[in-house]
Amino acid sequence: MSLNSKQNVRCPKCGQMTDVTVWNSVTVSDSVDLKQDLLRGQVNMFRCPSCGHAALMPTPMLYHDEEKRLMISFSPCHDPILKSQLFDNIRKTSKESGELSNLEGYNLRFVTDYNELLEKILIFDNGMNDKTVEMIKLMILSQDVDKSVDRVCRFGKRDGDEIEFMIYDARENQTYTSRVPIATYETVDTSLRESGVKPYSFDWEQVDGAYATKLLQGFNN
């Protein structure tokens, strides 16, 4: 079920107090409109009516799509040590509570970045698996290794027989696009399945660039 609460928030820029609806969980079957608001970047975003300052509320949120058997735990965090602790905690509590046994066949994802949350939703909405997509993103970034450290690649959309990816270069402050044939996705996906990578989770997972690198090194789930 989708759950929310009201919070009275002080604007960090001008000091104006504002009531904000904060969502702690979003269940797609409860409200399709709420999911669309999330994809538009409107959920848990503070916007000051006085000065216009906008910022993401530092509130954890659980996204649940029963039809797609997808659950994403989102905990806003930029500290790598805290991120690791939060990930270990959700794995531990999920097992101890028995919740994990009720999520067989699900894809369980842990993310700490808002854009990554939205990206995961779009990937599965387009009938794809993020493990395969992360491998393709790694392939795209590896085409220009010298610049890859400054770049972030995100899934954009599925467009006919192609997939469009958005590449942001922080040093150049420019966004580029890269288009990959669906046939390439299918080839990579088949290769992953044959290597033993499952299209579902046994536990909560962080599926990102580091995960894709481990797959290349021979590790799988």
Image (cartoon, grey):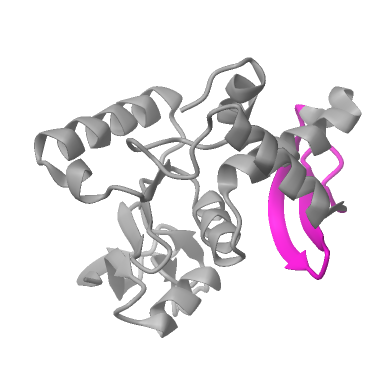
220 falls in the magenta region: no
Q: Residue at x 79, y 69 (%)?
A: 159
Q: Quadrant of residue 210?
A: top right
Q: Can you say whether 173 is above or below 210 in the image?
A: below
Q: Residue at x 52, y 73 (%)?
A: 52
Q: Quadrant of residue 123?
A: bottom right
Between 36 and 10, the one nearer to me in the picture: 36
The image position of residue 157, as x and y in percent, is 72, 64
Q: Is residue 32 left or right of residue 124?
A: left
Q: Residue furthest left?
A: 97
Quarter of the image with the N terminus in it: bottom left
Q: Is residue 200 left or right of residue 61?
A: right
Q: Residue at x 60, y 27 (%)?
A: 195
Q: Which residues are magenta?
A: 149-177
Q: Quadrant of residue 10?
A: bottom left
- Using the rendered image of the protein, determine whether residue 108 is visible from the camera's viewpoint: yes
Q: Residue at x 41, y 39 (%)?
A: 77
The image position of residue 219, as x and y in percent, is 54, 18
153 falls in the magenta region: yes
